[in-house]
Image: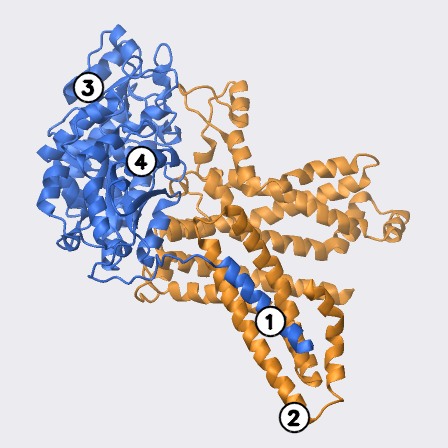
Chain colours: A orange, B blue
Amino acid sequence: MAIDTEEPTAPAEPVDEEPGGSTARVATTIGLRTVAVVAGVIVAIVALGQAFDFMRDKDANRFLVIAVALAVGVGGIFVLFWAMDRAVNLLPQDVSERVRPYVYVGPALVILGVFLVYPVINTIVLSFKDKTGSSFVGLDNYNFVFTDPSMLRSIRNSMLWIVLVPLCAVSIGLIFATLADRLRRGEAVAKSLIFLPMAISFVGASVVWRLIYSYRPQGFGSNVGLLNGIKLGLGQDPVAWLSQRPWNNLLLIVVMIWIQTGFAMIVLSAAIKSIPDDIVEAARIDGASELQVFRHITVPSVLPTIVVVTTYMIINAIKVFDIVFVMGGNAESNQVEVIAERMVKWFFLSNNDGRGAAIAVVLFLAVIPVMIWNVRQFRQQEALR
Amino acid sequence: MRYRRLLAVPVVALMLAAACGGDDDDDSGANEASGDQQENTGTVNLMSAGEPEEVDAYQQIFDDLINSETDYDVEIESVGDFEEQFQIRAEGGTLDVAAVPQPGAIPDLVDSGSIVALEDMGFDIDELNSTLGESFVALGEYKGKHYGIPTNINLKSMVWYPKAAFDAKGYEVPETWDDLMALSDQIVADGGTPWCVGFESEGATGWPATDWMEDIMLRTAGPETYDKWWKHEIPFNDPAVLAAAQQFGDVMFKPGYVLGGAAATPDVPFGDAPLPMFNDPPGCWLHRQASFINASFPETAEAGVDYDWFPLPAIDQEGTLFGGELTVVGTNGNRPEVKDFLDRFMAEDVQCDMGGVQASSRISPNVNVGPDCYANDILADASVILTDSLSSGTGRFDASDLMPAEVGSGSFWTGMIEYMRNGPDNVETVLDNIEESWPS
């Protein structure tokens, strides 16, 4: 409540301070205010400390803990910005206006620093250490990453994901968006159907697709898998799809294409709709066929969007983990390893922090060029507008 | 005016802080590793990989038999991602006591100073050896000191069979390996399939195959060579290991022996593998798996009537394969009441009551705990075999849980899968590959 009544007077404050009063009074004021601010910060830190201790208390009432967490999280951020704004107001006006933007982005920068920059640096350091992170081993872990047969396979498989997922998802999405655009009725329904898988998590989708590929050998009950149902219907023997090397990699990639096509289609469809009608009409009047319109008008017009969608998918394909983890079985023996899956395996299942960190660094380095390309494309696109 | 309003903020915050933070926290962390024992803090936390319902039953036993008599409280905690959390707590110095299913983790923790030697806590190792079996206690030994107390054991060398149909056919429980093979041949001759085998277990696919291999290795090479094997004192492609792998292959690859064929075993989920045994007529007659597998049997199947088990017979030597838990003490548990708790934990009365818990199939490694303590006959019979093997020194722990993780939960699994898929001719290559993956 006090906060609300405070707000309107706040901006006026420095103004009515400046003209009146002797230097001595100003000095006292500033002194008092500094003390108040320092005291406020100390109290806030103590209060936060107490609140965190309370939230860690196992015997405390769960609902009270949630209430405190909400109060600290939501109220805390509000109070933080409000208090910092007040603190900036206390500074001389020319200083305060220059400081204010930094104060506003400050907390975000600190949080980024603590939760992003620090872990990255720590991971890089860890990647040069042994499995418990206690002594340096030089480049041993990187040597492992680029010589271990399973790691090499994971890099090969990841390349396969990076090429196939964007290629298939974007082409299918583009074709579908173009065709759906021509539908007189039912465009929304058709697009919704393609978009639906996007709403399913990777893990959920993997569980669905496991049922499609499900296999049981002779004697262990009937085959409930869709694909094996079809094979049996045609009078053929069922197949253990997910252990058919190397084709099982493609069967896993299909799942991600199934999820991502809807996304590509929706974004591309929006881009196609924004192509001015007069260009298309002019082309038609000049006698261009449908295919020519697609090749020479639609595709060039939506090219920037295609680039953005593709980079987004490349990054997702580099990071893919869930699908392989859920459907891949024993990834090493099925030879469906991917880089992110190897990272989890070495970090958490084999407790080898050094190797896990080295794989993480390689993954991180692999994403960077794509990110740079993406940002550059985005800037060019913005510049054209 | 304005100053007073400004001051109001810290004052309100101060009041909030006073209101929220009443409790004293019990400083469970931040105790550095040191030889000195600390004061009694009033609670002992036992970290367990058990399911919540098992753990609730154990807590009840601790409340009745320990907490009612002592000036501290024992709380047992069921931890979902046990292996990870255990490492974090042990290395962070917040671990009191943990029951660890993989003794292979112990050397690293000793080297990092995260766990406390039993000798330093005042335990008498000779006494532990006599009640819990020397071969089991020795698994917790590293650099001349002991770090783990065996508190739970389960039998792996069990062969399950559909008793009703088995008796109706006039088959007899085999006493020797030759009898077992003769029985298998008999079943094939009668038009049946003797063995149901399934090695699929998601990311851990292959582990049931390593159990098979270990069971045979223990019986062909003997306990001493078995110890050399998991300690890597003989290479993984040693002739003794090759002989065991070939004998394993003799069962798997013999035409008609395995339902669906050996090549399909990596695709059969291990929990589904025994199910054809309960078809009418049985799809298979024999299933080798540890004592927990009857939880996967059909609910209508009755122990002792529809199914039963016999110990996997000896081959050239006697041996019994088991798994289990070693209880280790973290640096935060170096306190007199923890020693008192552990003494009571492995004592006969607590162990006996824990064997009676229906929700689990827990067998006590304490050789003085009699078969009467267990929830059912299957556990009671298994406990007799286990205590015999612990007293006679022929019992051995699951080797893959003792080998380094790169092998024990990596190349050993994948190697066995390759073996099943590619057939008996590539057995040498499989063993060479596993040997090569052994970390130096």
Q: Which residue is mark 3?
A: B180
Q: Amino acid at mark 3?
A: Leu
Pick the front one: A285 or B46: B46
Query: Where residue A203 sits in the image (x, y, percent)?
Result: 53, 40
Q: Is residue B236 visible?
A: no
Callout 2: 10 Å neighbours few (<14), some, many (20+)? few
Q: Residue A106: which numbered mark, if any?
A: 1
Query: Where residue A100 sits in the image (x, y, percent)?
Result: 67, 76
Q: Which residue is mark 4?
A: B58
Q: Amino acid at mark 1?
A: Gly
The image quadrant where one finds the N terminus of chain B is bottom right
Q: Give the distance between the C-alpha atoms of the residues marked 4 and 2, in whole angstroms.
A: 73 Å
Answer yes or no: are tags 4 and 3 on the same subunit.
Answer: yes
Q: Which residue is mark 2?
A: A24
Q: State which quadrant residue A216 falls in.
A: top left
- In this view, B108 is above or below B345: below
Q: Amino acid at mark 2?
A: Ala
| Residue drawn at (35%, 10%) of the image | B281
